Amino acid sequence: MLPFKLVYSEKYFLPIGEHVFRADKFRLIRERLFQLGAADDSDFLEPQPASEADLMLVHSLYYVSKLIDGTLTAREELEMEIPYSQQVVDTFVLHTGGSILAAERALTDGVCISIGGGFHHAHPDHGEGFCMLHDFGVAIRSLQKRKLIQRAMTLDCDVHQGNGTAVIFGHAGHKAATLPSWSAPELGAVNAAGNVRQGPCRDVFTISLHQENNYPFTKPPSSIDVNLPDGCGDADYLAWLDNALSSGLRQFEPDLIAYVAGADPFREDQLGGLALTIDGLKQRDELVFRAARARNIPVFVTFAGGYAIHVEDTVTIHANTILAAAAVFRPAPASS
Ligand SMILES: [Zn+2]
């Protein structure tokens, strides 16, 4: 039994046909956990679909209506890069409900993982890059509206920049943060080509570590963007992550962290150009969980992209995130 809950539904499967986005990965992750003996049925919570009112905490009425009525233009469907159907809409609404549940549960348990979600390219008024609805943005806004939290931090470790997140939470009119004071020599292994940029934030502080030369080609400013060079490996990545997270937590005290545990920084990803190993990705997860636990900040996790040549690798990377959380959050044995 795990020391926290996993949110999952068989209906997380996205009916999008043959696609580089393996929509069966959610089910495969669950099966892997059972094979490993790492989880059983009692570890799982079944999500409910998000309400339309919740969706509209982030998305425009116009966009939500078009999704429900099936009146997206051909261009809008093309930009989404997945086929439109009412079932696909329902699936995204369920993933969004799953992220809301995971965020709520993290407040009581310290951590909760939804085996889905992470649709960080969805914008208030359109979808793109396989993302129709911004599940964890809705979750944060829902908890804020109910006054369960005031301030949240998003930590996006997908290989692609979280442009939707930046647009939703990074609106103008906020006080710009100062640049961090670290420099490449102080980071040891870090490649000086890495480029850190800081933008504004208000009640949600957004951090994105991503490959600079990759989609989205226009990157609206997050609170901290770490633009990584092609081929960035484990040591450099972990040093940048450590510094970005430390810098963010020096500037901002969140009540909750939304961790986007993308599997696509993996070196054999078909849509990514970074060079992390499976072990490096697990160290990434451990670093995030340790930082959250050390500061007593609840963290909820969503699983974003993973397009490894072998789907088993994507499944291993995501399952490892759960194992990493179990190792960090397992209560210490009572001393004798
Ligand atoms: Zn991605």
Image (cartoon, rainbow, N blue to C red):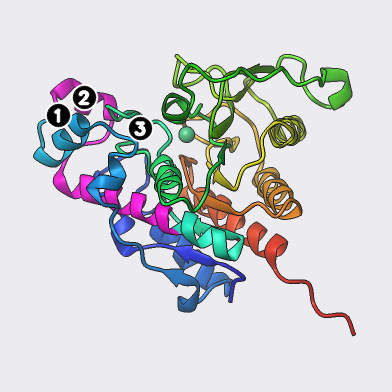
Instruction: Name the secondary structure under disc 2.
Output: helix
Going 25% across and 44% down the picture, which residue do you hit? 16
Magenta residues span: 72-101
- The answer to whether 145 is drawn above or below residue 36 in the figure is above
Identify which amino acid the numbered label 3 is placed on. Answer: Ala
In the rendered image, residue 95, in percent from the top left (x then y), is placed at 35, 51
Marks 2/3 in contact by CB < 8 Å: the verdict is no
Does 201 lie within the magenta span? no
**Is 256 on the left-hand or right-hand side of 184?**
left
**Residue 72, numbered circle:** 1
| Circle 3 residue | 122
Vertical arrangement, residue 268 with respect to residue 217, above or below: below
Disc 3: residue Cβ within 8 A of ligand 1's nearest atom: no
For numbered disc 3, what is the local secondary structure? loop
Q: Amino acid at mark 1?
A: Leu
Residue 69, image quadrant: top left
* Mark 2 or 3: the one toward you: 3
Where disc 1 sits, the SS reads loop
Q: Which residue is mark 2?
A: 76
